[in-house]
Image: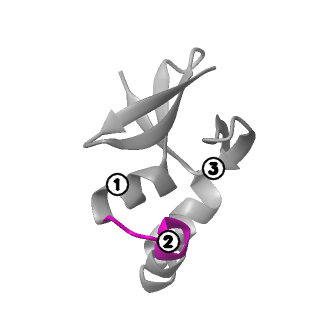
Amino acid sequence: MKNSIQLFEEKTIRSVWNDTEEEWYFSVVDVIETLCDSTNPTDYLKKLRKRDTLLGEYIGTNCPQVEMKTSTGKNRKTLPLKIDV
C-alpha cells in the first residue's frame, strides 16, 4: 500500500492505495473535517453514528481500519472510505 496526502480546498485528506484491490482508501475523519468544517471531526463522526443506527452498524462491522500516516509522520489506524478506480 502507498500512503498519500490529497488536497481539497486547501485541506489535507489522508489516503492510501491498495495495490491488491486496486482501490483508494480515504480517511473518513479527514473527509468529515473537510466537508463539514468541523473543529472536532472524530466527535462529529461518533454523534453521526449514534443518530443513524444503520450507519453505526455498518461502520462498526464492515469497515476494517487502515493504517495511514498522520501529520506528525506516525502511522495510525483510521476508518477508510473505499474508492474504486
What residue sits 29% from the left and 40% below the top? 8
For label 1, the crowd category at 10 Å Cα-Cα, with few meaning under 14, some 14 to 19 and many 20 or more, is: some
Q: Amino acid at mark 3?
A: Thr
Query: Is 3 situated left or right of 75 in this image?
Result: left
Real-space CA distance between mark 1 and mark 3, rounded to the nearest whole angstrom = 16 Å
Residue 44 in magenta stretch: yes
Dot 2: what SS?
A: loop
Q: Are marks 3 and 2 in contact (CB under 8 Å)?
A: no
Q: Residue at the location (57% across, 14% down)? A: 19
- Residue wearing tag 3: 78
Which residue is the site of mark 2? 40
Mark in front: 3 vs 2: 2
User: Residue at label 1?
Assistant: 34
- Please say if 12 is above or below 33: above
Q: Earlier in the sequence, mark 3 or mark 2?
A: 2
Residue 4, image x, y percentages: 52, 25
